[in-house]
Image: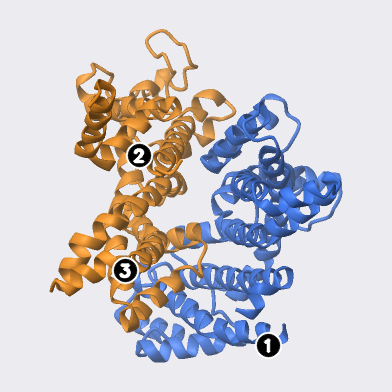
Chain colours: A orange, B blue
Amino acid sequence: MTVAANDIVAVARADKARGYWSLVGRRLARDRVSTACALVIALIALGAVLAPWLGLADPYQGSMIRRLRPIGTAGYPLGTDELGRDMLTRLIYGGRLSLMIGLTPVALAFVIGTTLGVIAGYLGGLVNQAIMRTVDVFYAFPSVLLAIAISGALGAGIVNSLLSLTIVFIPPIVRVAESVTTSVRTLDFVDAARASGAGPLTIMRVHVLGNVLGPIFVYATSLISVCMILASGLSFLGLGTKPPEPEWGLMLNTLRTAIYLNPWVAALPGAMIFVVSIGFNLLSDGLRSAMDVRS
Amino acid sequence: MLIYVVKRLVLMLPVVLCVALVCFLLVHIAPGDPLIAVLPPDASAELAEQMKHVYGFDRPLPVQFGLWAWHALQGNLGTSIATGRPVAEEVSRAVGNTVMLAAVAATIGFALGLLFGFLAAYFRDSWIDRVVTTVAIAGVSMPHYWLGMVLVIIFSVVLGWLPAVGAGPGGSTSWAWDWAHMRFLVLPAVTLSVIPMGIVTRTVRALVGDLLTQEFVLALRAKGLAETRVFRHVAKNAAPTATAVMGLQLGYLLGGSILVETVFSWPGTGLLLNSAIFQRDLPLLQGTILVLALFFVVLNLAVDVLQAVIDPRIRRS
């Protein structure tokens, strides 16, 4: 055997050992846009988590004589809000709640939706009909309307807005999970597993889940950006977070009255939502093409 | 074709019933007494019972649903708890404004989306494609309520060109298609058009880009067909999917304009919902959502039928 052929074998072995997901990871890392987005999101998330230890001002302590200072004031690099609180501090702290309410509903819907979708897709028949027709009912409402309707009926509060958003995101995930599972179910290896005596639970957990999780996960990541916008939107309407908690949507709402006095400070929290939302969207696009091994 | 439409109509009935059920149950998942908004805090238990009876809240749930659905069929959506006026009257006044706003926003969004999508697909991987893709991704990632605020800051506060809130000069409520009124429509319509613009661009770019690589396009070009005629073939093939996406987006505009209507104080269903939620006016909330959801269901049906008109294969399956 020549040296070159040995190399090829070695590379092939290494690829196999690292597996599909590490290949996806490496392809994603090579994509400049995705890396940049991941960095920006990681920075904002890190700032949010470490906020109390960054030596920032108190996010709740304001001062009536320092209200609505413009961007670039000494000591207040991003100005102050309508109650004289430091904007930079509140924007960094705001990431805590905003990221939490943007990610939690998608994560919950991913778990619940995948479970329901895989069950519906694998078992088929009456179970499928029962689950999928229920899902259809939710498709008769525009998603924003449904979220606002449920939140509005339940009343304002973080828990209620998380609940309403989770309900909104379950149906689309169930649909994707069901359709992927239905196409996997008829493949030979599932028949082989059944022939070797595996029960439906084992087949779903071991053989089906591993093959459907990827596409469902990519789809779920594409929902994060919508969820960020909607979650902050509920707070913006006054249905989510309550003052004085720093949260980007709510900050945008309370600063709305200040647009004639200090317009650019008032627009800052929305810019944060926009940056994070565009970051998650580009990252999701990158992940989708990185997972498409054919390309 | 007629058989197809009838079949779709029959399939729509259970959906309508379920939508009505969900809207009805909304009031009953709400915590607390639905009459809390009208009853004075020191009302006697007797008075509370009496009010409950007047609004029908003392009957068993299935009976309440049956009565509510029966009245809704006759166009009676109950009485607003906060204002005491019929819900149907309040909703029908607001729904016209919402439909108008959504239609204008959809026209802007779809026109730009189609143009950008075709451009990006025809000039794939060029600078045009990169610019269009960036604009589209910004559009779909846009917190539109924030964009509304930014547009108000630029065009109302800084430049002073357009009004910031309302739907007519001097708070007038009657609409007219003159510039004095249409000035009020510009900012909310542009704000609302950004998301459908982004989504239609992305869909059409992927769709047309895929079609252009197919062999039938190569064959059409090989036999010497003019590029404008080739375009017609491509457009026809992209039409069913593009129609479906645009129909869905129009529905989202109708139901999702609440945030933008709140920013601009546009007197539509969104503003109505907003006040219903914060005054805990549950019949009004229920009625507005029912009307919007029914609009959405009918729109979906219209899209299905339109798709079948464009693509005969859908009719036969």
What residue does disc 2 label? A98
For disc 2, the chain is A
Mark 1 element type: helix
For disc 1, the chain is B
Q: Nearer the viewer, mark 1 or mark 3?
A: 3
* Type of amino acid at the residue the image marks with label 3: Arg
| Residue at position x 50%, y 67% in the image | A141
Using the image as rendered, state which of residue B189 and residue A216 is in the foreground: A216
Within-10-Å neighbours for mark 1: few <14, some 14–19, many 20+: few
Quadrant in which residue B126 is drawn: top right
Quadrant in which residue A291 is drawn: top left
Please state if A77 lies on the left or on the right of A111 as rendered. Answer: right
Mark 2 element type: helix
What residue does disc 1 label? B3
* Type of amino acid at the residue the image marks with label 1: Ile
- Looking at the rendered structure, the number of numbered marks drawn on it comes to 3
Please state if B44 lies on the left or on the right of A78 as rendered. Answer: left
* Type of amino acid at the residue the image marks with label 2: Ser
What residue does disc 3 label? A185
Within-10-Å neighbours for mark 2: few <14, some 14–19, many 20+: many
| Numbered circle sitting on residue A176 | none
Residue B83 % position (x, y): 55, 68
